[in-house]
Image: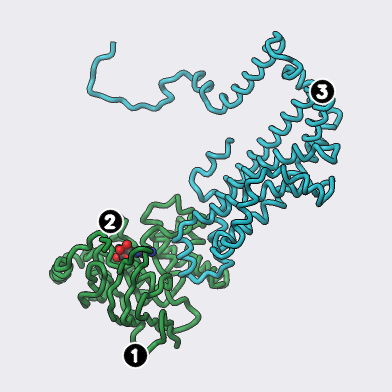
């Protein structure tokens, strides 16, 4: 086992944490000014957990995820991610915006991570076909992204991350830009995929519904600078059916609880130069 | 009289117009008809003595000259040499330009080192370098390849650089998150993403190559369309000159069409990449 320390040396991590966040904070330098995106906080995420971060726009959710993905460094503190094996990638990110490569066919987009790692061709093809089918893209394997709808592009993005078979999936509001029906369909498919693999998932959203439907655990963030203000266990049994879950009285109760938490926060205001 | 009504009818366009009008108005027909019309006017104006035939011989006499040059085999030889010089020079310039453009585009350090030098040379009219190049490489073919190569290099280099600078950051983020090596990032991300810009650069480069080659063929050779044009100037054989000019135009247009087709095929992932290729 080895740890990936993002900054500083790893102190004794709480034994079973997959991701340990300690005294982490992040500011962006704008030259004349600084924006504090994340306020100092601690947090542990366990192996195989499906965690949703929920918070208003601009509270630093993307920033947190980019740090987990190794695309950004903390300003202070550290993130320690515990690796299981060197044979599989540690994280794969599904971005908020469209991020599939327009110059690759759907098939090659999904195979991207495997090609990067030099997985043998035959193995690649099997994995790609499996996830294309699971994501309902079987017929579009040879299409180019410009021939797909927005929802299908996001499916490709999901398939690309799953096919890469990482230890941790990082998902940044992947369904936020989609219409309600497509969104629910994809949430359902994500639940099914996750049931098969039981990976650690860090999922970011600004939708209370989405967080409750998907997660084992919802971490509610304050407005900017963001930090966790509540850590809520979601105990609906799995496998879950999205549309039926929403009819449960317990769903409504938890929805309302989170709503009040968010409502007690000042709205994220546009940045003011001090 | 049409009754005033509350209906707005939206109908297929074609049903309004008679067939002949559609044919005349089709863009393909217009594209052929307009130069043809210009040639006819030119011929008439020449025959009526409205324009000086010493400078503007009639199209029919030019075509007669063209047929003579073709049947004597001379024209093919000239065309072949010019095509050879443009092709060799093009690859000599374009290949390093693309490689350097990609590498520099993704490396701020290399940009800081090389950009000032390249930017300083860029504004020099390339043909002004030709005397120096002839001193270095002699009067033979090499100096012609080199000057064409230089002209092509700058066009392709700056286009490639712009292409890399325009790559959406998110694609590079994906590559990084998925653990792509530098080489993989060039091959799988930077190169294909910048390809539309690179193609534009190549098309500009071909235009430059034709300008430069025609001037360069003035020196140290008895072959090439440029030579044909300069010789006809010396012996005041204006019809040969027009044949030469026409062939350069056809050569340029032919190359652009071929590049357009290649682009449409290589960049089929981009919607409407093909619409550009007509010019
Ligand atoms: N690259 C950056 N440079 C400067 N400021 C940034 C950058 N990325 C994000 N920010 C700022 O950090 C804050 C949090 O942004 P972000 O993490 O994208 O929020 P969220 O994803 O929760 O909407 C915002 O105020 C944003 O303007
Ligand atoms: Mg965001």
Which residue is painted at 20% across and 76% down in the image?
A230
- How crowded pointer 1 is (Cα within 10 Å; few <14, some 14-19, many 20+) is rated as few
Colour-to-chain, cyan: B
Q: Of callouts 1 and 2, which one flags the residue occurring earlier in the amino acid sequence?
A: 1
**Quarter residue A18 falls in:** bottom left
Vertical order, B256 against A220 (above or below): above
- How crowded pointer 2 is (Cα within 10 Å; few <14, some 14-19, many 20+) is rated as few
Residue B225: image location, x then y, percent:
78, 34
Q: Which mark is residue A181?
A: 2
Q: Colour of chain A?
A: green
Residue B83: image location, x then y, percent:
75, 41
Residue position marked by numbered label 1 in the rendering: A15
Q: Which mark is nearer the camera, 1 or 2?
A: 1
Residue position marked by numbered label 3 in the rendering: B236
* B144 on left or right of A168: right
Front-most of B258 and A190? B258
């Amino acid at each position: 086992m080895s740890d990936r320390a993002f900054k500083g040396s790893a102190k004794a991590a709480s034994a079973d944490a997959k991701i340990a966040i300690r005294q982490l904070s992040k500011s962006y330098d704008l030259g004349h000014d600084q924006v504090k995106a994340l306020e100092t906080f601690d947090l542990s995420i366990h192996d195989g957990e499906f965690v949703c971060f929920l918070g208003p726009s601009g509270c630093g959710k993307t920033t947190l995820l980019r740090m987990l993905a190794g695309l950004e460094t903390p300003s202070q503190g550290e993130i320690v991610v515990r690796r299981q094996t060197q044979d599989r990638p540690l994280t794969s990110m599904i971005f908020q915006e469209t991020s599939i490569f327009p110059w690759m066919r759907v098939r090659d987009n999904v195979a991207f991570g495997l090609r990067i790692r030099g997985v043998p061709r035959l193995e690649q093809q099997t994995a790609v076909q499996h996830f294309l089918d699971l994501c309902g893209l079987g017929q579009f394997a040879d299409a180019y992204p410009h021939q797909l709808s927005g929802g299908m592009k996001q499916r490709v993005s999901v398939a690309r991350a799953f096919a890469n078979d990482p230890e941790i999936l990082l998902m940044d509001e992947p369904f936020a830009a989609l219409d309600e029906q497509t969104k629910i369909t994809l949430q359902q498919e994500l639940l099914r995929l996750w049931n098969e693999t039981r990976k650690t998932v860090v999922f970011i959203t600004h939708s209370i519904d989405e967080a409750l439907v998907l997660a084992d655990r919802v971490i509610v963030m304050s407005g900017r600078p963001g930090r966790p203000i509540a850590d809520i266990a979601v105990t609906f049994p799995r496998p879950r059916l999205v549309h039926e879950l929403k009819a449960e009285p317990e769903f409504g109760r938890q929805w309302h609880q989170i709503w009040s938490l968010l409502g007690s926060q000042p709205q994220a205001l546009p940045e003011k130069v001090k | 009289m049409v009754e005033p009504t509350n209906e707005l009818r939206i109908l297929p366009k074609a049903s309004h117009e008679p067939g002949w009008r559609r044919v005349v108005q089709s863009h393909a027909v217009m594209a052929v008809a307009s130069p043809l019309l210009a040639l006819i006017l030119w011929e008439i104006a020449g025959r009526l003595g409205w324009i000086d035939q010493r400078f503007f011989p009639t199209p029919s006499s030019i075509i007669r000259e063209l047929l003579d040059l073709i049947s004597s085999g001379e024209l093919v030889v000239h065309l072949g040499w010019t095509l050879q010089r443009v092709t060799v020079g093009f690859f000599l310039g374009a290949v390093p330009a693309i490689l350097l453009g990609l590498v520099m585009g993704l490396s701020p350090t290399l940009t800081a080192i090389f950009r000032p030098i390249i930017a300083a040379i860029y504004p020099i009219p390339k043909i002004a370098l030709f005397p120096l190049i002839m001193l270095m490489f002699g009067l033979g073919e090499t100096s012609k390849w080199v000057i064409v190569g230089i002209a092509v290099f700058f066009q392709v280099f700056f286009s490639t650089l712009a292409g890399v600078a325009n790559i959406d950051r998110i694609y590079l983020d994906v590559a990084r998150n998925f653990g792509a090596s530098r080489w993989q990032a060039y091959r799988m991300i930077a190169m294909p993403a910048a390809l539309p810009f690179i193609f534009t650069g190549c098309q500009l480069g071909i235009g430059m190559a034709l300008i430069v080659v025609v001037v360069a063929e003035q020196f140290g050779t008895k072959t090439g369309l440029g030579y044909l044009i300069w010789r006809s100037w010396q012996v005041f054989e204006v019809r040969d000159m027009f044949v030469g000019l026409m062939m350069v135009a056809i050569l340029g247009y032919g190359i652009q069409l071929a590049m357009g087709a290649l682009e449409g095929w290589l960049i089929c992932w981009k919607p409407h990449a093909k619409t550009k290729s007509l010019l």
